[in-house]
Amino acid sequence: SVEFVPVFPGCESLESNSEKIACMSSKIGDFIKDKFRTERFNYLNLYDVQKVYVQFKIDTFGNITNVIARGSNAKLEEEGVRVIEKLPKMKPGRQGNINVDVMYMVPIIFKVN
């Protein structure tokens, strides 16, 4: 845990860490819904829920780095990495007045249409 969490663009006006975390989760979720190409996976079973877990770091400059995905399919992992790498630059996390790296894990869960 960090004293001041990273801030997603559009969440700067919020006061508490919990509000900023909720805003970031919502914005990342919307971003993934907009950018993740579910149609690329029409060959997968239509009745199965697909899951990809993507871990990444928001570095001391607010950049997204060290993106790693784990899923049931290499193509799903590639798409998860592709999308997360496109996240916008953020205000970095801080411990006191020092910018610090912060790790995040995001589940991407969907059904093939």
Image (cartoon, rainbow, N blue to C red):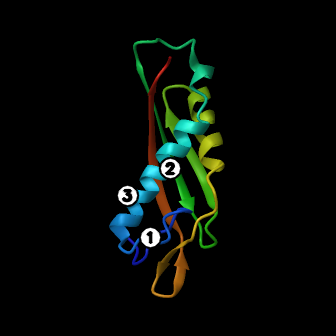
Sequence order check, earlier mark of 1 and 3: 1
Amino acid type at image mark 2: Ile
Marking on residue 68? none
Q: Tell me how far mark 2 sits from mark 1, CA to CA.
A: 15 Å
Secondary structure of the residue carrying tag 3 is helix
Q: Give whichever of 50, 35 is nearer the camera.
A: 35
Q: Residue furthest bottom?
A: 97
Residue 43, percent from left and from top: 57, 11
Are the residues tagged 2 and 1 within 8 Å (C-beta)? no
Q: Which mark is residue 28?
A: 2
Residue 97 x/y as whole percent? 51, 88
Q: Which sits earlier in the primary sequence, circle 2 or circle 1?
A: 1
Q: Which circle, 2 or 1, is nearer the viewer? A: 2
86 relative to 97 in the view: left or right: right
Name the foreground residue: 20 vs 6.
Answer: 20
Q: Which residue occupies 61% across, 27% down?
A: 75
Looking at the rendered image, the quarter that the N terminus falls into is bottom left
- The residue tagged 1 is 5
Task: Decide which of 11, 107 is in the foreground and name it.
Answer: 11
Picture quadrant where residue 57 is located: bottom right
Residue under label 3, please give it: 22
Q: Secondary structure at mark 1?
A: loop
What amino acid is at disc 3? Ala
- Amino acid marked by disc 1: Val
Separation (CA) of disc 2 from disc 3: 10 Å
Numbered marks: total: 3
Q: CA distance from mark 1 to mark 3?
A: 11 Å
Q: Going from the N terminus, do you reach mark 2 or mark 3 first?
A: 3
Kindly identify the residue that appears in the image at 48 percent across and 60 percent down.
Answer: 103
